[in-house]
C-alpha cells in the first residue's frame, strides 16, 4: 500500500491584508514614475508623422564665423598674346623658320609667291604711267589753247584801240570839213564791232580756261585713282612676306614647305612668352560670380604667386566657362606653354556670417526649408539661404547659431512636418 504525502506537507501562513496593500501601492508608484519618465518620448512618437533612424542622417550645427567663397582647380599656362598668321593672298609658301624658333617683331617668317598678284601690279603700274602721260599732254594742250585765246583777246583789244583812234580822226576831219559824215559813221560802226569782238574774246577766254581746268582735273583724278590702286596692290605684294607681329617663339606650323594655299589659310602661330596667363575651366554655376580683377592665387613647383582674373569667356562649353588669370606683379621665370598649375580664385570673404555645412538639404525643395533637430524630433523649418562655398552655405534667415540641422538623408522624411529621430 502506497503512502500519501501528508507527512511532507507544511502549512503556509497567508499574507496579511495590510502587507498586500503595501505591495500593490509600491507597484502602482513604480508604474506612474515609469510613465512620467517615458511620457515626453511617447508623446513625441505619437505626434510625429514618421520615424527615421539616426544612422541614415547627416547633421551639422549652425555657426557664426568667417565665410570664404572661392574656386579651386587646375589651370594651364597660355600666352596672353598668341597670334595666328594667315595667308593674305593665294600662292605658294616658302617657310623661313621652324617650330620653336625664337623670332623678333617684324622678322620674316614665311613668304608667299603669287604670280597673278605681281602681274596685276605690273599692269596697273603701266596704266598709271599711261594716265600720267595723258595728264601731261592735257596740261600742254591747255597751255597752248590759253596762249591762243590770250592772243585773240589781245588782238581784239588792239583792233578796238585802232577803231577808237580812227573814229577820233574821222570826227576831227568831219568837223574841219575834210571828211564826209559817212566816213564818221563807218568809223563808229567799226569801233562798235571791235568792242563786241573784244567782249566775246574775253568771255571765250574765261569759258575755255574753265573747260581746260576741268579736263586737266579729270585726268588728274583718274591718275590719282589709278595710283591708289597701285598702292593697294603694292601693299598686297608687301603682305606676301609674313612677318612676326611680336617678339616670341614660333608655335605651330599649319602648312608644309612649298605648299599652295588659298587666301586666308592658316600658316603658323607665334607665342609671346613675355606675357603668360593661366587658364582654368570654371563650372557654369560659378561663372556668373566671376569678374575681371578678382584676386586669385597660382601655385606650382612648391611656390605660389598672386594673380588677378584678366578675362572670362562669354561662351559655355560642356557646362564650363574658360577664365584666365594674369600674374599680379613680376612674371615667374621658366614657365612653359601648357604647363599645369594649381589655381584658386577668391570670390567672397566676410566675417561673422551665419553658415552651415553644405549638404543635399540645400537642393531639396529649392532650399526653402530645413529640418532642425530638437529633443529627438526633426521639425521642418522655413529658411532662406545665401551664397555657397565649397564646404559651407550662408544662412540668411530661419536658423540661429547652435541649431542642429539635418543636412543629408532628409529625403527619407518625404516632406513630413515632424519626424522622430530614433537611435
Image: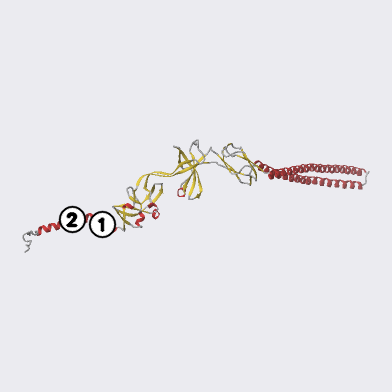
Q: How is the image coloured?
A: secondary structure
Secondary structure under tag 2 reads: helix
Q: Which of 64 and 21 is in front in this view?
A: 21
**What whole-number distance in Å separates the C-alpha atoms at marks 1 and 2?**
17 Å
Instruction: Give me the residue at 16% from left, 57% from top.
Output: 27
In this picture, residue 213 sits left or right of residue 315: right
Of callouts 1 and 2, the N-terminal one: 2
Q: Which of 342 and 367 is in front in this view?
A: 342
Secondary structure under tag 1 reads: helix
In this picture, residue 55 sits left or right of residue 306: left
Q: Which mark is residue 30?
A: 2
Q: Which mark is residue 312?
A: none
Asked whether the residues under the numbered discs 1 and 2 touch, taking CB atoms below 8 Å apart as contact, a structural biologist would say: no
For the question of whether residue 21 can be seen, the reply is: yes
For the question of whether residue 220 can be seen, the reply is: no
Q: Residue furthest right?
A: 178
In this picture, residue 224 sits left or right of residue 365: right
In this picture, residue 116 sits left or right of residue 360: right
Percent position of residue 182, x then y: 91, 48
Q: Residue furthest front?
A: 1
Percent position of residue 201, x then y: 82, 45
Quadrant where the N terminus is found in the figure: bottom left
Percent position of residue 398, x then y: 35, 52
Instruction: Give me the residue at 84% from left, 46% from top.
Output: 197
Give the crowd class for mark 1: few <14, some 14-19, many >=20 residues within 10 Å: few
User: Label 1 belongs to which residue?
Assistant: 42
State how many labels appear.
Answer: 2
Give the crowd class for mark 2: few <14, some 14-19, many >=20 residues within 10 Å: few
Percent position of residue 393, x then y: 39, 48
Amino acid at each position: 500500500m502506497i503512502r500519501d504525502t501528508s507527512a511532507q506537507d507544511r502549512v503556509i501562513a497567508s499574507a496579511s491584508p495590510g502587507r498586500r496593500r503595501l505591495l500593490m501601492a509600491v507597484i502602482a508608484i513604480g508604474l506612474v514614475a515609469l510613465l512620467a519618465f517615458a511620457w515626453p518620448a511617447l508623446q513625441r512618437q505619437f505626434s510625429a508623422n514618421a520615424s527615421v533612424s539616426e544612422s541614415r542622417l547627416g547633421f551639422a550645427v549652425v555657426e557664426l564665423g568667417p565665410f570664404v567663397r572661392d574656386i579651386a582647380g587646375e589651370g594651364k599656362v597660355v600666352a596672353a598674346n598668341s597670334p595666328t598668321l594667315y595667308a593674305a593672298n593665294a600662292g605658294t609658301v616658302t617657310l623661313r623658320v621652324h617650330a620653336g624658333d625664337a623670332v623678333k617683331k617684324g622678322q620674316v617668317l614665311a613668304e608667299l609667291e603669287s604670280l597673278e598678284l605681281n602681274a596685276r601690279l605690273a599692269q596697273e603700274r603701266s596704266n598709271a604711267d599711261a594716265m600720267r602721260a595723258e595728264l601731261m599732254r592735257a596740261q600742254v594742250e591747255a597751255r597752248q589753247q590759253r596762249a591762243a585765246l590770250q592772243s585773240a583777246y589781245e588782238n581784239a583789244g588792239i583792233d578796238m584801240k585802232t577803231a577808237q583812234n580812227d573814229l577820233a580822226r574821222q570826227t576831227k576831219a568831219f568837223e574841219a570839213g575834210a571828211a564826209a559824215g559817212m566816213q564818221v559813221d563807218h568809223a563808229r560802226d567799226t569801233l562798235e564791232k571791235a568792242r563786241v569782238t573784244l567782249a566775246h574774246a574775253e568771255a571765250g577766254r574765261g569759258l575755255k580756261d574753265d573747260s581746260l581746268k576741268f579736263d586737266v582735273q579729270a585726268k588728274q583724278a583718274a591718275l590719282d585713282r589709278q595710283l591708289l590702286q597701285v598702292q593697294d596692290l603694292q601693299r598686297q605684294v608687301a603682305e606676301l612676306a609674313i612677318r612676326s607681329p611680336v617678339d616670341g617663339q614660333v608655335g605651330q606650323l599649319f602648312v608644309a614647305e612649298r605648299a599652295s594655299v588659298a587666301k586666308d589659310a592658316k600658316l603658323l602661330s607665334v607665342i609671346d612668352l613675355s606675357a603668360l596667363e593661366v587658364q582654368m575651366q570654371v563650372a557654369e554655376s560659378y561663372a556668373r560670380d566671376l569678374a575681371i580683377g578678382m584676386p586669385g592665387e597660382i601655385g606650382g613647383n612648391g611656390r605660389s604667386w598672386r594673380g588677378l582674373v584678366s578675362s572670362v569667356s562669354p561662351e559655355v562649353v560642356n557646362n564650363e566657362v574658360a577664365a584666365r588669370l594674369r600674374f599680379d606683379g613680376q612674371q615667374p621665370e621658366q614657365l612653359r606653354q601648357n604647363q599645369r598649375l594649381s589655381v584658386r580664385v577668391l570670390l567672397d570673404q566676410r566675417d561673422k556670417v551665419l553658415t552651415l555645412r553644405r549638404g543635399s538639404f540645400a537642393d531639396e525643395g529649392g532650399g526653402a526649408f530645413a529640418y532642425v533637430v530638437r529633443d529627438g524630433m526633426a521639425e521642418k523649418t522655413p529658411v532662406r539661404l545665401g551664397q555657397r562655398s565649397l564646404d559651407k552655405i550662408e544662412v540668411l534667415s530661419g536658423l540661429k547659431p547652435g541649431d542642429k540641422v539635418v543636412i543629408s538623408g532628409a529625403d527619407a522624411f518625404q516632406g513630413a512636418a515632424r519626424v522622430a529621430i530614433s537611435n
